[in-house]
Amino acid sequence: MGSPTGEGGVKETQLGSLLRPVRAGNAFEETVERLLQAIKLGVVPHGERLPSERDLAVHLGISRVTLREAIRSLQEAGYLDVRRGRYGGAFVLYLPPDPSDGDLAEAVNQMGAGDLADALTFRMAVECGAAQILATTSLDPSQRAVLLRRLSEVNDAAPADYRRLDTAFHLSIAELTGSPLLAAACADARLRVTDLLNAIPVLGPNIAHAAVQHQAIVSAILAGDPDGASRAVAEHLEGTAALLRGFLA
């Protein structure tokens, strides 16, 4: 899907982790799931167009008929705006809702306390592992540039863009390992907590603290320090878990 070294290439690579082939028996349902992952994680943000029908069908391993049914369902649900003509396509309408009182508790109730603990454990395992592996990888200049750019983007992000760019930063670590399975696992882990993170406000002090932690993660990776990279990710994710617990208290 293109080189991961440019801005479009990074997005295409992250899409590749999400838009992997679906199983024939549940083609429609899994296509909806894959497209929703890309939309909810902000890999294709509000106002941008999904890849062409041809590209989506190839990457998902499905017929255009199945793809069109999935897109039509997401259009009816308010996630996509389908436009015809030369400059047409399926454009993302979804925007994460502004958090309000009770949203987090409701999200946790729907998830279940046991599933929440499991999701946080899963995320800890795969993201620490991804950073550890990447720190043992010989990164070329373009790969290092991707990581540094994603760091700069999230640490300089406006509050409205923070969650999306934070997701892009975390996913880029897994992507750069070169393992599609690990990248897909990290995307899945992030998706499991996305509704929870969207249910709490973006706080200035938390962003500032996270920026220091993001820098520590990248510094350890670029220094070739796998243990340091794993510890930095663990500290960062523990902070996120503590923030969730605080708002639930």
Image (spheres, helix red, strand yellow):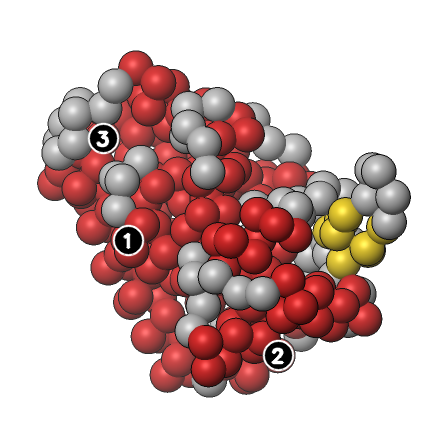
Kind of residue indicated by mark 1: Leu
Which quarter of the figure has residue 87?
top right
Compared to residue 208, the image places residue 144 above or below, namely: above
**Which residue position is annotated with label 2?**
106
**How far across and down, in percent of the image, does residue 187 sit?**
42, 55
Q: Is residue 210 visible?
A: no
**How far across and down, in percent of the image, does residue 203 sit?**
59, 45
> How far, Cα to Cα, is label 1 from label 2?
30 Å
The earlier-in-sequence mark between 1 and 2 is 2
- For this rendering, which residue is in front, 186 or 30? 30
**Which residue position is annotated with label 3?**
221
Which quarter of the figure has residue 224?
top left
Q: How busy is the neighbourhood of tag 3: few (under 14 within 10 Å), some, or many (20 plus)?
A: many
Q: How busy is the neighbourhood of tag 1: few (under 14 within 10 Å), some, or many (20 plus)?
A: some
Residue sitting at x 46%, y 82% = 25
**Which residue position is annotated with label 1?**
182
Compared to residue 230, the image places residue 191 above or below, namely: below
Tally the numbered discs. 3
Q: Is residue 102 visible?
A: yes
Image side of residue 90 versus residue 183, left or right: right
- For this rendering, which residue is in front, 226 or 65? 65
Give the secondary structure at mark 2: helix
**How far across and down, in percent of the image, does residue 232 sit?**
25, 41
Which quarter of the figure has residue 71?
bottom right
